[in-house]
Amino acid sequence: MDNQGQYSDYAEPITLMKELTLRGESFKISFRKKNGEPRVIHRAQIRKQPRSKDDKQSAYKIQLIDKDRDELRSAYIPLILAVNDKPIIL
């Protein structure tokens, strides 16, 4: 992460999301859906990734639980915009 409070790659925010989930804590994630529509989950946690034979695009996605709505979600990693309000700018 650089001095301006933004991520310059996806590795650090993904690691943060995994650590928070392991501690039982939630995080806020902002991303775009494939159709370009913005989406925000205010209390998310990571869930188990599907096997690649079940979802051929699983390598490009992160699987989430929306704790507010008790729904399962997924986001394409390249379409993640911010984690806990820190933007990802490549």
Image (cartoon, grey):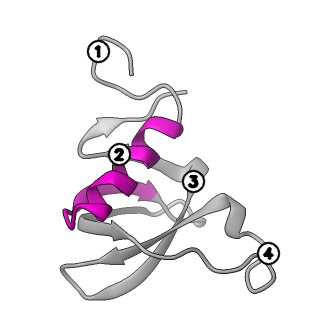
* Start-end of magenta stretch: 10-31
Answer above or below: position of 41 versus 12: below
Dot 2 corresponds to which residue? 16
Judge by depth and name the residue closer to the eye, 85 or 1.
1
From mark 3 to mark 1, how far is it between C-alphas?
22 Å
Quarter of the image for residue 26 reads bottom left
Viewer-nearest of discs 3 and 2 = 2
Asked if the residue at tag 3 contacts the one at tag 4, i.e. Cβ–Cβ closer than 8 Å, the answer is: no
Left or right, 2 with respect to 8, comes to left
Dot 4 corresponds to which residue? 56
Badge 3: how crowded within 10 Å, few (<14), some, or many (20+)? Answer: some
Q: Position of residue 30 (x, y in %)?
A: 35, 54
Left or right, 12 with respect to 71, comes to right
Quarter of the image for residue 7 reads top left
Q: Position of residue 11 (x, y in %)?
A: 52, 38
Q: Is residue 28 magenta?
A: yes
Q: Earlier in the sequence, mark 3 or mark 1?
A: 1
What's the mark number on residue 77? 3
Asked if the residue at tag 1 contacts the one at tag 3, i.e. Cβ–Cβ closer than 8 Å, the answer is: no
Answer above or below: position of 57 versus 5: below
Residue lying at the far front in this picture: please name it.
Answer: 23
Give the residue drawn at x 58%, y 74%. 49
Judging from the image, what secondary structure is the residue with disc 4 in?
loop
Image quarter (top left, top right, bottom left or bottom right) of the N terminus: top left
Badge 4: how crowded within 10 Å, few (<14), some, or many (20+)? Answer: few
What's the mark number on residue 47? none
